[in-house]
């Protein structure tokens, strides 16, 4: 499931999230959701539910891990070869 989420994030990474309002973010998410297959929608829903079930500390750690993995993606891919 995380693989799909990361894939979706990479494909939409060109969108500047820092400058978007909450409404613009929701609109952009809705547009992407309208484009994905139904099987992916279920995975997205499960991911969101799982994220909401985490404690604030777990969410913070998860966000930090994602940031590190995103920053070191090229290095990790080279090491995996």
Image: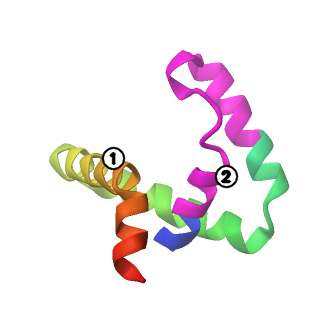
| Marks 1 and 2, the one that precedes in the sequence | 2
Callout 1: 10 Å neighbours few (<14), some, many (20+)? few
With 56 as the anchor, is 27 left or right in this view? right
Q: Residue 24: image x %, image y %?
A: 67, 22
Q: Residue at x 59, y 27 (%)?
A: 16
Q: Residue 74: image x %, image y %?
A: 43, 60
Q: Which residues are magenta?
A: 6-30
Q: Residue at x 26, y 48 (%)?
A: 59
Which residue bears the numbered disc 2?
Answer: 11
With 23 as the anchor, is 60 left or right in this view? left
Q: Quadrant of the C terminus?
A: bottom left
Of 74 and 27, the residue lying toward us: 74
Instruction: Say if mark 1 contacts mark 2, CB within 8 Å.
Output: no
Q: Residue at x 25, y 47 (%)?
A: 64
Label 1's element?
Answer: helix
Q: Residue 2: image x %, image y %?
A: 47, 69
Label 2's element?
Answer: helix
Q: Residue at x 40, y 72 (%)?
A: 78
Seen in the picture, residue 55 relative to 50 is either above or below; the reply is above
With 69 as the anchor, is 16 left or right in this view? right
Of 49 and 26, the residue lying toward us: 26
With 13 as the anchor, is 65 left or right in this view? left
Of 59 and 13, the residue lying toward us: 13
Asked if the magenta segment contains residue 23, the reply would be: yes
Q: Quadrant of residue 38?
A: bottom right
Q: Residue 52: image x %, image y %?
A: 37, 51
Q: CA distance from mark 1 to mark 2?
A: 16 Å
Which residue bears the numbered disc 1?
Answer: 67
């Amino acid at each position: 499931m995380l693989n799909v989420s990361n894939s979706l994030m990479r494909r939409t990474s060109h969108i500047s999230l820092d400058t978007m309002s909450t409404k613009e973010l929701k609109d952009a998410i809705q547009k992407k959701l309208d484009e994905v297959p139904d099987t992916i929608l279920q995975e997205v829903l499960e991911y969101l539910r799982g994220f909401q079930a985490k404690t604030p500390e777990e969410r913070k750690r998860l966000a930090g891990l994602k940031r590190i993995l995103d920053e070191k993606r090229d290095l990790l891919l080279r090491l995996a070869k």
